[in-house]
Image (tube, rainbow, N blue to C red):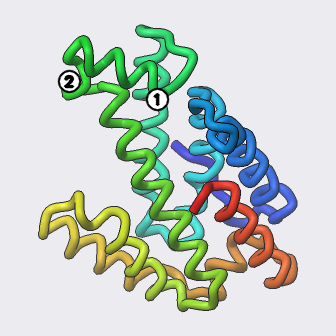
């Protein structure tokens, strides 16, 4: 299960998420590979943002937490210093398509993170949260979902919280401008 950002102050929520993504992305910016633990910690800190969309999205944060655990289990069983090394080993050993493979969990973690970053980018650009969520979904997750799941997900997007509620949830009572600024910093840190 994930922690909720609902009711937390932004001082307690968004800045540590930004810092975690800056740490995870620092190797990428210099041409290096991604440190597994830094990436997993960053994802764990990002996942609760799904709570700000409303209860209908609790599953997204939970799915991200499950995928993080799958990667941690794979790393425990097959240690690697970098995520690319873990994935390469799974491919060479033909384990990348097996249940519980880190490759599949990482693929979904990246897709889910891209959804959240795209959503935040759109909201901070002034797009209504429901429209932003629909557009972000179409760009990031929809291509990998079947027709039934797409319809269910899109229904959930329209039942999600409005922009004011999302920003209030993320901001924990602080000024909207501060929350928007912190959310933009997160989008930049996440590489969106």
Q: Secondary structure at mark 1?
A: helix
Q: From what the image shows, is residue 2 above or below residue 97?
A: below
Q: Quadrant of the C terminus?
A: bottom right
Q: From what the image shows, is residue 26 above or below residue 3?
A: above
Q: Is residue 134 rendered to the left or right of residue 93?
A: right
Residue 41 in view, yes or no: no
The numbered disc on residue 69 is 1
Picture residue at 30% right of the left edge, 18% below the top: 90
Task: Determine the image quadrant of residue 97.
Answer: top left
Earlier residue among tags 2 and 1? 1
Q: Secondary structure at mark 2?
A: loop
x and y percent of residue 124 in the render?
66, 81
Residue carrying label 2:
98
x and y percent of residue 104 in the render?
30, 36
x and y percent of residue 94 in the render?
20, 17
The numbered disc on residue 28 is none
Picture residue at 75% right of the left edge, 65% below the top: 185
């Amino acid at each position: 299960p994930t922690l909720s950002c609902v009711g937390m102050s932004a001082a307690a929520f968004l800045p540590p998420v930004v810092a975690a993504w800056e740490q995870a992305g620092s190797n990428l910016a210099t041409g290096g590979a991604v440190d597994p633990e830094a990436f997993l910690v960053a994802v764990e800190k990002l996942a609760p943002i799904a709570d700000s969309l409303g209860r209908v999205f609790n599953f997204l944060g939970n799915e991200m937490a499950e995928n993080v655990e799958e990667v941690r289990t794979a790393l425990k069983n097959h240690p690697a210093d970098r995520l690319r090394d873990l994935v390469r080993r799974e491919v060479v050993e033909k384990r990348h398509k097996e249940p519980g493979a880190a490759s599949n969990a990482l693929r979904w973690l990246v897709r889910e993170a891209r959804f959240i970053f795209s959503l935040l980018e759109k909201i901070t650009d002034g797009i209504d949260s429901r429209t932003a969520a629909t557009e972000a979904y179409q760009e990031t997750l929809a291509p990998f979902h079947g027709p039934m799941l797409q319809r269910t997900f899109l229904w959930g997007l329209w039942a999600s919280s409005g922009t004011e509620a999302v920003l209030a949830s993320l901001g924990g009572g602080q000024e909207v401008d501060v929350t928007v600024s912190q959310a933009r910093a997160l989008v930049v840190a996440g590489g969106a």
